[in-house]
Every structure is written in structure tokens, then in C-alpha cells.
Image (cartoon, rainbow, N blue to C red):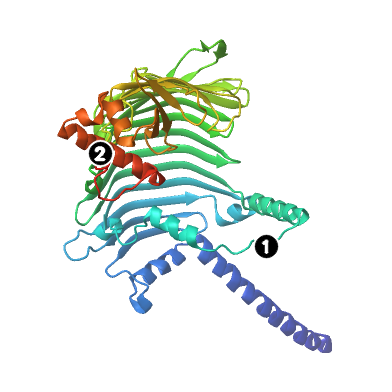
Amino acid sequence: MTRSGRSTRPLGCWLGCLTLLVGFPAVVIIGSYVILAHTAVPLKLMAMALKSSEAGLGIEGIEIDGIRGSISRGFRIRSIVIPGREDAEETRLEDLRFQYNGVSDVFRNRRFIISELSVQSAYIELDSSIFDDTDSAIDPLTEESETSEATPSPAPETTPEASSETGSREDEEAEELEITFELRSLELQNVRVRTSDRTFELAIPQFQLAGLLVENGAFVLQSLDARDLSLRRDAIDLALDIPEIALKDAFLSNDRFDIAEFAIASNLIDAELQAIAPEEIDGQMIPYSQRLQLNIAPAIHPRVVQAFDFNIDFAPIGDRVISRFSGFNNAFEQVHFPDRTSRAMVTSFRPRDYFQIESDLVPERCSLVTRREADAPADVAETVGECVLGATQFDFPAPDAEWDAIARTTDLQISARWLDENNQFSRFGAFTSDPPLSQPEIVARIYFQTPLDRLDASQRSRVEAIVRELQQAQPEAGNTSGVSILSDS
């Protein structure tokens, strides 16, 4: 018995050592994981790093208090204070809360769910240079010219099989990267952001958002409610006050558009979603269901001289939604039909009644109807009607396919062409006459219905300005130097 007892001691020692060797690292690993993932220690370490001035990583004078939570599920910070520079006020955030579904769930199930994101009070002061983009501004014309002068390198040759494989691989990678995003609650209270020179200021007294879901290309929002928002930007004379924004039950995707309620009230734009009835237009019944009615105030832009209305009507057609645009006191309407054709119409529309327009080539008044066949390109359409330019009426279309409109007088026939521009009101860009006359003479007949040699000095000056604008629009049409355009007429 004594011999047997002595023989078990080495075995017990070996088992104890083995347990210690295996168990101690396991305890360290598990303990480290618990501390890093499920306690506030990592957050406090990051706060200490921000306070540290070593290696330039810290923010001088920052104070972060009341840290609770973890990086695995979310956290709460009672306050963050950053001292202001020189005469600037300090930046302060109070009661910051962030809760989400956890790191493991994000990577395992490819979904990122924020259950709570809120700030109860915040004042953020930005350096005024944040909006100083004059040094980095790029002239689009210069950029385009430099790009066009560069010699492009030849593209590598690829076979159809290689292109197909590349496309499939990219689709698979995109599918693997798809992630569901959900924001169940966002609440901001008493938030103000402004620059140190007070030329920019954003105030958000109350903002609540609930039930936001982005998944498989669809956008779903349960509700949004905001009160008494304001935005000031002196550099562009922007002063926006929004007493109320309300939205409920929105669903947006490539083939569906549904919003139960929407309204916005502001000093620049008022918007409201209304229920409307189906309507028959040009023999086709269109099942309109909702209208977004907008009222735009002149304060929205310096070039807007009169308030105007603009409406967007929505009609579900199978797996798609078609629309109708109208506005300017029924002077404008664009309709998309169920058979995929469209019609745009302006009736006695006077753009200068609503906008400050510098170009003399924009018509005074237009009544036009443009029809486009199903799935036709944007530049393939038939336009019928008339526009008044100066003292002359132009009729559409012109008999000559090279020109868009024609005007006939007792002794002259004038053809005109539109400028191909999408960034402003349509305007005329070239004229010709039969019998042939000089451009200044044609312009004098269009605007004053009088030969050029009978115009007074102010009228001749206007003709010269109009011809110069024509030459700038069509540089190949003639000289654009400082020499008088009328000197050789």
C-alpha cells in the first residue's frame, strides 16, 4: 500500500502542471476577450489615447467622462468637451448613446442593426476655413480641355470570355459585400453646428427617425419627424427655416414608390403629399394615386422673382411607377403614359414672369407640344407650336429639317435653331434668312421688325449684344473680338 501511494504522486504532479499550462492561457485568453469585448476598458483606453499628446495622436484639452458599455454591443458617453481655439467656444456633446447588434452578428449574418443612436445636446464649432474652397476650386472648362488634350493610353485587349468572367466575378464580389443596414431609432436634441466666424449655422432642436431599413436595393422608412430646423449660409445668401418635416411609411425601390404621409413646411419650400384620382389623358387611363405638391418661394434663389407651384403625380403601372410633372399655374405639363410614350406641353409660358433671365435668346412666351415615342432617345421627338422672340413669332417645326422653327414676314423668311443645352431654359442659338441677310440685320428684324439702319443708338447697342451672344454660343459663326459687330453691316 505504501509503495502504491508513493507511485501516484508523480502522476498527480504531472496532471496539475498540465492543467496549469493549458488552463492558465485559456483563462488569460477568455478573460482578455471578456475585458476587451464586454467591458468599457477598451473605450476608456481610447479616451486616454485621445487625451495623450504623445506622437501627435491626442486632442489638446479634450475631456471624455462617463463612459459605459462595450465595443461589442454599444456604449454611452455622458459628455465630450473639446476646448475652442483662441476666441472660439468649446465643442460639447452630452449623453451620446450607441447600441447595435454586435460585431459577430455583423460579420456572420452581414447585417448592421443600430437599435439606438442619440445625442441629447451638442454644440460643435468648426473652423471657418472648412468652407474655404477657393484654392481647390476646379474650372470645369479648364479641366475638360486638359483632359481632352491628353493622349489616352490604349485599353488592353480582352476576349468576350474574359469579359464575361470578369463581370461574373465582380457580381459575385458585390453580392458578397451586400449588407443589410437597419437604423431602428435616431434621436437628436438641441444640436447646433456653426463656424467660428458665424457665417454658417445649423440648428436641430428636435429630430427623430424610426424604422430605417436598406436592403436589396430597397429603402424603407417608418417615420421621420423634425421640428424648428434652421440653416444659415451667408456665402450663398441661404436662410432656411423648417418648422416641420413629417414622413410616414415610405418604401422606395427601382420598381416601387409608396409614401403614406409626407409634409414639409419652410420659408423656401412647402410640400405636401395628397391622394388623387385616376385620370384619362389623350385616350389613356392613368391610375394616379398620389401627388407631391410643392410651393416654391422667391427666397429660394436670387434669380427667382415670383413664387410658383410644381406638382409630381405618381401612378403605379404593374412593376413600375410613371409620373406627371406640372406647374407654373398650369402653364407646364409633362406626362408619361402607360404605353411608354410621353408628352411635354407648355401653354403661354412666360419664363421671365418667374425667373430673372439674362439671355436675350430665351423666348418671351412659348406654347409647345413635344411628343416622344416609346423608349425613344431624348433627342428624337416631335415638337409643334410657337414661340415669341422679341417681336416675332416662330412656328415649330420648320420645313427644313436642319432648322427647328420658322418665322415669315412680308419680305423675309427667318429660320431658327435651338441650342442643345440641358442646364438652363431653352434658347435660340442660330438664325438664317431667305433672302440672305447679315446676322445683325436678321436680329434687328426679329426684335424690332425694322431694318438695321432705322434703329436708334440704344436699339443698335442691343442688337450688337445679341449678335455677340450668338457668336459666343456658336464660335464658328464669326468673330467674337472687341471690334464692333455692326461696323461692317
Q: Secondary structure at mark 2?
A: helix
The residue where tag 2 is placed is 464
The residues bearing labels 2 and 1 have C-alpha atoms spaced at a distance of: 52 Å
- x, y (%) of residue 458? 16, 34
Report if residue 212 is visible in the image. Answer: yes
Which badge, 2 or 1, comes first in the chain's sequence? 1
- Taking depth in this image into account, of 95 and 454 the one nearest to the observer is 454
- Relative side of 489 to 158, left or right: left
Residue at the image point whose x is 70% and y is 80% from the top: 16
Please tell me whether residue 430 is drawn above or below residue 309 in the rendered image: below
Q: Name the residue nearer the viewer: 365 or 249.
A: 365
What label sits on residue 473 in the rendered view? none
| Crowding near the residue tagged with mark 2, few <14, some 14–19, many ≥20 C-alpha atoms within 10 Å | many
Tell which of 489 and 165 is nearer to you.
Answer: 489
Residue 390 percent across, percent down from the top left: 28, 25
Report which quarter residue 462 is drawn in.
top left
Q: Position of residue 322 (x, y in %)?
A: 54, 24
| Mark 2: amino acid | Glu
Mark 1 residue crowding within 10 angstroms, few (<14) / some (14–19) / many (20+) = few
Point 34% across, 74% down: residue:
52
The picture quadrant where one finds residue 474 is top left
Left or right of 302: which side holds 332?
right
Residue highlighted by disc 1: 156
The three-letter amino acid code for the residue at tag 1 is: Pro
Picture quarter with the N terminus: bottom right
Direction from residue 347 to residue 110 in the image, left or right? right
Eye-nearest disc, 2 or 1: 2
- Picture coordinates of residue 122 (x, y %)? 29, 51
Q: Where, quadrant-wise, is the C terminus in this rendering?
A: top left
Residue 118 placement, left or right of 460: right
